[in-house]
Image (cartoon, grey):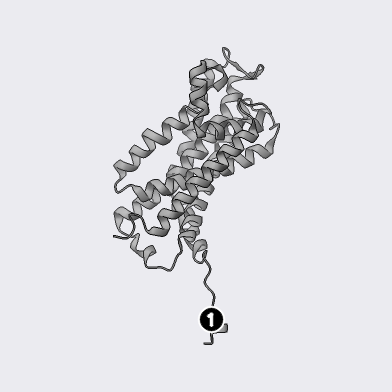
Amino acid sequence: MSAASKPSHGPLDGARTLFYKEVLRFWKVSFQTVAAPVLTAVLYLLIFGHVLEDHVKVYGSVGYTAFLIPGLVMMSVLQNAFANSSSSLIQSKITGNIVFLLVTPLSHWAWYVAYVGASVVRGLVVGTGVLVVTAWFGLSWPAQPQWILVFGLLGAVLMGSLGLMAGLWAEKFDQLAGFQNFLVMPLTMLAGVFYSVSSLPPFWQVASHLNPFFYMIDGFRRGFFGVSDASPWLSLLVVLGFTAVVAAWTLRLLKTGYKLRH
């Protein structure tokens, strides 16, 4: 075969196959990976909405149940995007089947696109499920749907990247659980999912604005009501910057084979 007729190999060769494998991995157990998170979000809504609906109004006239729904949707997107890439990679490392990927000519870009792409799919599927099931509780038609799409997609990419980083770093499930329980969960729960940050005392308002997860949830909620605690453009800038940093760091770790090649 002449040099001119040899097939070229791009940086994303094989990404499609790995992406398909990762999507199939979570879809085959969709009762656990999709239905269970949707049920959890509905339980949150039923409990908090029942207790606080008649006592809390947000943004002047928005009922608490309607306010809560976008927060639960975005929380589900973030947590499931993180869980998909992190759990898949750590499971492959512990069982040893990661070697079958290491012997392939996959580039670090192909790994990143496949793992994060599948995480985005799972996050958005779960988020859509939560929205469909909970919207009839009182959520009106979105006021600015472009922000819903932008922050939903960026949030899933960010958390998929962070999950991939956590999966590379962790050597056992306990370490991964610690990463999720002591970093991802607190930052998500303290980002305004269940309350408006503007209702907090001044110190906690400042603390909340230092949390990048706040901007993802606040920007996403802006799409439903047309109002938010922070400017959507500021939120977009923060989320873009944070996503770029995490993605670049994750790509660097993949390129060097961090904790993959011993």
Which residue lies under the disc numbered 1?
6
Residue at 37% of width from left, 68% of height from top? Answer: 103
Please state the horizontal and vertical placement of residue 129, each as a whole percent of the image. 56, 39
Work out whether residue 192 or residue 253 is closer to the camera in this orientation and state it. 253
Q: Quadrant of residue 151?
A: top right
Q: Is residue 233 above or below residue 16?
A: above
In the rendered structure, the answer to whether residue 50 lies left or right of residue 254 reads: right
Please state the horizontal and vertical placement of residue 209, each as a whole percent of the image. 53, 27
The local secondary structure at tag 1 comes to loop
Type of amino acid under label 1: Lys
Residue at 53% of width from left, 18% of height from top? Answer: 50
Please state the horizontal and vertical placement of residue 246, each as a whole percent of the image. 48, 46
- On the rendered image, what quadrant is the C terminus found in? bottom left
Q: Is residue 71 visible?
A: yes
In the rendered structure, the answer to whether residue 20 lies left or right of residue 87 reads: right
Q: Quadrant of residue 96?
A: bottom left
Q: Residue furthest bottom?
A: 1
Work out whether residue 200 or residue 73 is closer to the camera in this orientation and state it. 200
Q: Is residue 55 above or below residue 171?
A: above
Categorize mark 1 by other alpha carbons within 10 Å: few (<14), some (14-19), many (20+): few
Please state the horizontal and vertical placement of residue 171, each as a whole percent of the image. 30, 49
Q: Quadrant of residue 124?
A: top right
Q: Is residue 122 visible?
A: no
